[in-house]
Image (tube, grey):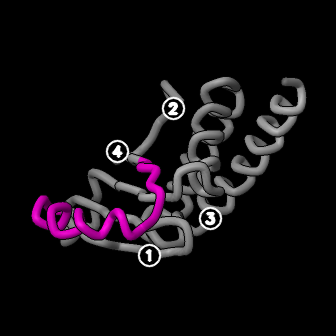
Amino acid sequence: MTGIKAKPIIDIAVGVRSFESVKPFVQNLEGNGFIFRIREVGNWLFACGDFEKDTRTHHIHFVIYGGTEWNDYIHFRDYLNAFSEKALLYEAEKIRLAGLYSTDRNAYCEEKGRVVQIFFQEADDYFQKLDKLD
């Protein structure tokens, strides 16, 4: 996804065998400025940044390696890297949503999430077709 506009947030996906294996690192993450933000089925999110100003610099997503969330992240990245026109469409939609929701971060994230889900599905369909060719 090189070359598309984005907020200056580094998103890191870490594949783990189980969330139990993350627990020993929580205290270390928190000691280094990461806050445990979300615990969802299949995804634990830690965030770092200036929370008083509502800005984040890093997100660490712990997901089950080989699981749905892992595959979504990897396929999304690879799909946008393989198809520059899709990356540009994604960029244009993020810019549009940022204009619409410049003062409502939650609404922006919710709407962007819908767009990302569409791209996840497109990427999944693409990689399933590739797998059938092998």
Say whether residue 16 is magenta: yes
Mark 1 — residue? 39
> Does residue 120 appear left or right of residue 70 in this picture?
right
Q: Are marks 4 and 2 in contact (CB under 8 Å)?
A: no
Q: Which of marks 4 and 3 is in front?
A: 4
Compute the Cα span from label 1 to label 3. 20 Å
N-terminal label among 1 and 4: 4
* Amino acid at pointer 2: Ile
Mark 2 — residue? 4
Pick whichever, 97 or 36, lies toward us: 36
Q: What stretch is highlighted in magenta?
A: 13-33
Mark 4 — residue? 10
Compute the Cα span from label 1 to label 2. 29 Å
Expressed as whole percent of the image width and height from the top left, the position of residue 13 reads 44, 48
Mark 3 — residue? 111
Pick whichever, 56 or 68, lies toward us: 68
Name, please, the residue furthest toward the left: 31
Question: In which image quadrant can residue 10 be found?
Answer: top left
Q: How crowded is mark 4: few (under 14 residues within 10 Å), some or many (20 or more)?
A: some
N-terminal label among 1 and 2: 2
Expressed as whole percent of the image width and height from the top left, the position of residue 42 reads 55, 67
Q: In which quarter of the image is the C terminus?
A: top right
- In the image, residue 28 sits, relative to residue 134, either above or below, namely below
* Amino acid at pointer 4: Ile
Q: Residues within 10 Å of mark 2 (few under 14, many from 20)?
A: some
Question: In which image quadrant can residue 85 be found?
Answer: top right
Compute the Cα span from label 4 to label 2. 14 Å
* Amino acid at pointer 3: Glu
> Does residue 85 appear left or right of residue 105 in this picture?
right
